[in-house]
Image: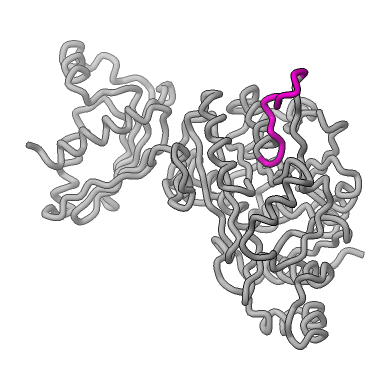
Amino acid sequence: MLPTLAAPSITPDYYDDYIDFAALALQDADFAKVCGANDGKVDLQDPKALQQLTKSLLKRDFGLAIELPDDRLCPPVPVSQTYILMIRYNYVHWVQELLDTTSDNYDDTYDPSRRVFGIDIGTGASAIYPLLFASTRPNYRLLATELDSTSHASAAHNITLNNLSSRIRLHQPPSATAPLLPLDDLSLSHASFVICNPPFYASAADLVTSAAAKSSPPHAVCTGADVEMIYAPSFGSSGEYDRNPGGDVGFCFRIVEESVGLQERVQWFTCMMGRLESVGKVVARLKEVGVRNWAVRCLRAGKTRRWAVGWSWGARRPRNDLVRSSLVNIGGVQPFPTEQAIHAEEKTAEELWDTVGRALNPLDLRLEIDAERKTVLGFAEKNVWSRAARRKRAREGDEDSSKEAQDEEVALGFRIKVNEGNLDIRWLEGMEEKLFESFMGMLQRAIHPR
């Protein structure tokens, strides 16, 4: 008989609060047994205690139940003097926000009516990512892939346990060399996103070296099997790395290569990395293959950090805080900002609104104006604000200005919000960062003429 679970108690944006174990023990009898047997403390070197903490948090906060084999990776709960909930949910919510801020409505908000289909590569024994997506967003459907037979069987059980078989499809690839993204094999036309938490290490020695390099021992025991933690490098005939160094970088490289063939059939490809230096290597590869729209993110929970990389072959640009992070502090990985401001403290909102109107109205732009909110949503086919473009338009007249909006190719999409003393400009769409820079320069000159 399937369990009846309580509705989740919270749906957080990002977890950053410490967990009150005493409160959790009062809310969950199974967790109370773990605490009560150890004087109100949790021994996180005990795999059973670690699993119970994870289960209790998922039950309380998301209404989810999971059961895990002892020899498979427990979704880790980063631990400190007091404890932090799952870093994995922060990854899930980041991906959700990438989608929210690159949707057709251009308003950077969650659309509950939007139907989303995602793919989780290597879902693991818990199927934790599909469960989190499905429990927090009712219109999300997922394909979860898992090669390992033991983990596949456990994932299938957890999906059924939560009554989510109608929304989460489980797929076992025929071999380790099969495509990671089986859209063609499964006759899938497209996907909204790809998520992947790959094996972090290239070998058992790499795992040991990485653990030894840490300044302090892990707070919680690791219960992962080698298949979940190690992805070996591939070698060419010469014995050199065959463009795949193994570990999280090598696994992500495979996704990058497959994304080249799929392009806009998937809106967002993402991968979570275990080491900061991995981010630089992945972004360098993205640039090599021609990706011009990517995002980096530091995911934190207590002292634990992971790093996420996302990329899209499409032109929709996410919100700036989702694509750039000061905590990803290595050169060359930050994409161009998607939000900028022009300050004019001496001017009122009304004065700035009038100035923006005088600057934009003569141009061959498609504009949606909200005078009450002092917001302009605009789209351009090309640079129509340069002096050369203005002269050409004056010569040719308005003969092309009646073109239907739906037939236009968007070279630049933007939103301007006028406030007291400043403008906030959001880059919504486009592949050319120089075009956005040029547009910003035009607005700057309009607000601050020489």
Determine whether 408 is above or below 306 in the image.
above
Left or right of 343 in this view: 296 = right
Left or right of 20 in this view: 336 = left
Camera-nearest residue between 168 and 54: 54
List the single residue furthest toward the left.
450
Which residue is found at the position 39% from the left and 41% from the top? 338
Region rendered in magenta: 237-248
Colouring: one colour
Choose top left, top right, bottom left or bottom right for residue 106. Answer: top left
Residue 289 place in picture, x, y as percent = 56, 24
Res. 375 visible in picture: no
In the rendered image, the quadrant that contains the C terminus is top left
Specify whether residue 240 is painted magenta: yes
Choose top left, top right, bottom left or bottom right for residue 182. Answer: top right
In the rendered image, the quadrant that contains the N terminus is bottom right
Residue 350 place in picture, x, y as percent = 16, 51
